Image (cartoon, rainbow, N blue to C red):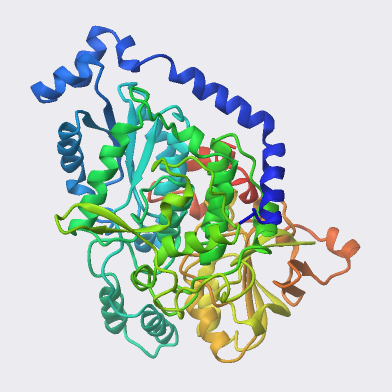
Amino acid sequence: MPLNPVLEKVTANIVARSCATRAAYLEKIDRARGHGPHRKRLSCGNLAHGFAACSSDDKAAIRGAVHPNIAIVTAYNDMLSAHQPYERYPELIRRTARDFGATAQVAGGVPAMCDGVTQGQGGMELSLFSRDVIALSTAVSLSHDMFDAAMFLGICDKIVPGLLIGALAFGHLPAIFVPAGPMPSGIANDQKSKVRQLYAEGKASRAELLEAEAASYHAPGTCTFYGTANSNQMLMEFIGLHLPGASFVNPNTPLRDALTVAATQRAASITALGEHYQPLGRIVDERAVVNGVVGLHATGGSTNLLLHMVAIARAAGIVLTLDDFDELASAVPLLARVYPNGRADVNQFHAAGGLNFLIAQLLDAGLLHGDVNTVNGTGMDGYRKHALLDDAGKLAYTPVAAASYDETVLRPIANPFRPDGGLRALNGNLGRAVIKVSSVPAERAVIEAPAVVFDEQDEIKAAFERGELDRDFVAVVRFQGPRANGMPELHKLTPVLGVLQDRGFKVALVTDGRMSGASGKVPAAIHLTPEAACGGAIGRIQDGDIVRLDAIAGTLDVKVDNAAFSTRPQASAEGLAAHHSGLGRELFSLFRDSVGAADAGASVFA
């Protein structure tokens, strides 16, 4: 199937726009490759420190510098359910590496905070910045220059993007991302959401809410809704940094372990010591980035990836813009309905055919670049298959089925849930924002209503409890951008606005902050740039101004005379000082002062 013309055009635009920066990046990683293992150039003292704690066999292999030495960079901790299974991965990887004639060492650990724990709390204001801390930590881990390849153990919201940004600074090394998989299904996500709304209305007790939450988040593994963590897993498979079929296999199962064993063997096979050298920086190219955007649209993935993918691309010398996302949305249909875009969870999605059925459908429609480099060494065609165990308990693959096993969850290209992708860019006199349209009811795609302006998400809850919001309105929540307070997810707003929408009111959100990847049904123009703290127009909106959010036309405007609006005074951020101390926030002033705009990835590296 010929490549879709929109896909072809967007890819060509990215290549042209990135010509100088991509060339400089590739020259850098080519210089870094050098000749042979870098540890050969370490002093004897350096090298002895590097293998001092190893077994005698591993010491001999590392000092000989003829066997691959694999770095393990881990985001393990046992509070974060998605990462708890990683506790036993290093020993499994080390044992497999030895069996395959290689060695493996834990090169370092990176922090991994749980957005589920910090939602609505002060710690959430460190969440986005933690991505760049993780990138820095990854660089420190690999800076010992002892390694021929790297395996990255991470799943959740900021962890995978941070690991990949850091890894791309070492783009001459092969790299494989190793997931741990989603927890088994608990109570239905929509049932959990209903209890949250009842609690917001005062119709459910805290004990009832806690019981529902505990029945949903109940075991090791990733949360089962299709938020940022699971969107990250999709991205790694679409870019070609997972083995085929690796993303959504449950933790602590024989198939999960077999995939980890295979990933270790593959990492040892694609180093510069062998004939199948596959450096990370050559995998993450313009075509792979476009494939990732296509996967995001086709699955209705998390809006957080609009930030992370821009930052990841820039780390590889590629200039990706919101215009690219928006243009691709017109060509890529929505093929999946996974909560919050539907009722199913990721386990049901995987059982219906999952990412590999989706990849096959998109390839056959000319909506993916098939001729890309992947860790599997096969191009994207190698991802048209499901992972399973054969009769001997070994990893094997079978071609994907020709049809979805459940078209309420996953559909073929000929019968999409909607003809366009799940994410859109919005432009207008308020600036530039993004919206997730895949879970917004069609009758809510255009909202025009008076503004009610807030500086804190808690103010909305208080106004709701006072009965002041039983009407049509657009909630404008400002001073929530990266420069203001680290751009926290405003997850507290979801139950309140959801209740009001269910009561029949036309409600929407406009903010320079973020929403959780689990949010969806209320129209929300988020990541608004410029942010209020940088003089953005959102800081001049007043209560009662008519705001129009049009997800169909892709516009976001305040309907006030332009001359009068431009002369209005900018709102002051009097309450921000309270957000700059406590829970470690005072240590992040350097990040707040230097972070880039949301549409440039909200990164301190931009």
Query: Which residue occupies the foreground of this view, 513 or 246?
Result: 246
Residue 562 against residue 372 in the figure, above or below = below
Residue 65: x and y, percent?
A: 25, 16
Residue 493: x and y, percent?
A: 51, 73
Residue 523 against residue 261 in the figure, above or below = below
Q: Residue at x 29, y 60 (%)?
A: 249
Residue 319: quadrant of the picture: top right
- Identify the image quadrant of the N terminus: bottom right
Residue 322 placement, left or right of 575: right
Residue 96 placement, left or right of 459: left
Q: Residue furthest left?
A: 56
Residue 402: x and y, percent?
A: 44, 69
- Identify the image quadrant of the C terminus: top right
Query: Which residue occupies the foreground of this view, 319 or 584?
Result: 319
> Is residue 303 visible to us here?
no
Residue 230: x and y, percent?
A: 40, 60
> Is residue 32 visible to us here?
yes
Q: Residue at x 51, y 65 (%)?
A: 299
Residue 459: quadrant of the picture: bottom right
Q: Residue furthest top?
A: 44
